[in-house]
Image: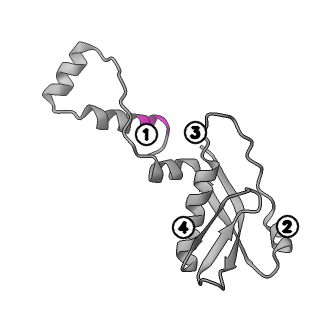
Amino acid sequence: MSKFYYPAVFHVADDVGGYWVEFPDLPGCFSQGEQIEDTMEHAKEALGLYLDTSDDIYERTIPDPSSITKVMEQFPKEIVVLVEYDDIKYARMYKNKAIKKTLSIPEWLNDEATKEGVNFSQALQEALLAKLNLL
């Protein structure tokens, strides 16, 4: 489980209204919104998309976050805040596609669980969450 905090710079979009946000440490990572609250939510999603390397074909280097003080010095007239990226929270929100797994259990256990109407998928998910201390 990884958790990072990247400084984000929020700009007022005078020409069209609303806000836009950039992450100076992450080239090309930016978003926008009409209100500061939805801009923050879009910033979290953009940060997650940028930092989630689980589907990358090629390895890429993600730079470490700069100190918020340094970024505030670079952008003294803008709103600068730390935005959190938590890989587990991100995955739970955006990566819920079901994945088929083939597994083996003893026949007697299958028979007993089937008699009791156990949902095998749910039981496996609950067991994995418990095993990974993610409950």
**CA distance separating discs 4 and 3:** 21 Å
Q: Amino acid type of disc 4?
A: Glu
| Magenta range | 128-132
Residue 70's mark? 2
Q: Quadrant of the N terminus?
A: top right
Q: Is residue 13 above or below residue 55?
A: below
Q: Are marks 2 and 1 in contact (CB under 8 Å)?
A: no
Q: Residue at x 18, y 20 (%)?
A: 111
Badge 2: few (under 14), some or many (20 or more) residues near its Cα, within 10 Å? few
Q: Quadrant of residue 122?
A: top left
- Report whether 4 appears left or right of 38: right
Q: Is residue 94 above or below residue 23?
A: above
Looking at this view, is 81 or 13 the one in front? 13
Label 2: which secondary element: helix
Q: Position of residue 52 (x, y in %)?
A: 60, 46
- Report whether 47 appears left or right of 25: left
Residue 54's mark? 3
Q: Amino acid type of disc 2?
A: Lys
Q: Quadrant of residue 43?
A: bottom right
Label 4: which secondary element: helix
Q: Residue at x 63, y 60 (%)?
A: 84
Q: Residue at x 81, y 75 (%)?
A: 75
Q: Characterize the magenta stretch by its predominant secondary structure.
A: helix
Q: Which residue is mark 1?
A: 129
Looking at this view, is 23 or 115 the one in front? 23
Q: Position of residue 99 (x, y in %)?
A: 38, 34
Label located before the other in sequence (4 or 1) = 4
**CA distance separating discs 3 and 2:** 30 Å
Q: Amino acid type of disc 3?
A: Ser
